[in-house]
Image (spheres, rainbow, N blue to C red):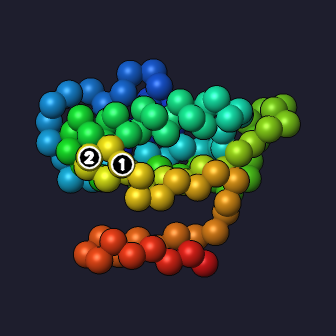
Amino acid sequence: MTFLLCDELVKHGLIGDGHTLDLIFHPIGVGMFSEEQFSEWIGLAKNIAKQHGAIMIGTSHADGAYRDSEVSIPIAYCINQNGEEIFVKKNDVRTVILDTNTGSLGYF
């Protein structure tokens, strides 16, 4: 198990390429500034999860723009070890419960 903080995802990814992990946490902080950033970060998360054979979970604050930015798109995601989406949430601040044994999702 390990973690990537916020924009470490974009700056240098997960150092130690090729190591197999079970779980990677990605606490993001504020929401995304644009649709392009959202797509970029989800794509990078898929690549890292697949590369390390790990489930990757990331989430931002429900609301909170950075400095004077007027755009803040809340994000939450879970990617499986094959780089496939278990769930990806954009601008949806509901809580998600994932049962890792059954794969079922609950939204609250």
Which residue sits at x=80%, y=38%? 71
Q: Is residue 12 left or right of residue 73?
A: left
Residue 35 on image: x %, y %: 68, 35
Is the residue 11 above or below the residue 8 in the image?
A: above
Residue 1 in view (yes/no): no
- Name the residue at the top extreme: 11
Estimate the spatial distance between the alpha carbons at disc 1 and disc 2, rounded to whole Å: 6 Å
Residue 105 on image: x %, y %: 45, 74
Question: Element under label 2?
Answer: loop
Which residue sits at x=57%, y=35%? 39
Q: Residues within 10 Å of mark 1 (few under 14, many from 20)?
A: some
Looking at the image, which is closer to me, 15 or 33?
A: 33
The type of residue carrying mark 1 is: Glu
Q: Residues within 10 Å of mark 2 (few under 14, many from 20)?
A: some
Which residue sits at x=85%, y=36%? 70
Is the residue 52 above or below the residue 98 in the image?
A: above
- Name the residue at the left extreme: 19
The type of residue carrying mark 2 is: Asn
Residue 20 on image: x %, y %: 14, 42
Query: Are discs 1 and 2 less than 8 Å apart at CB?
Result: yes
The dot on residue 104 is: none
Residue 72 on image: x %, y %: 74, 42
Q: Is residue 28 left or right of residue 53?
A: right
Looking at the image, which is closer to me, 27 or 76?
A: 76
Identify the residue position indicated by label 2 in the image: 82
Identify the residue position indicated by label 1 in the image: 84
Image quadrant of residue 53?
top left
Residue 90 in view (yes/no): yes
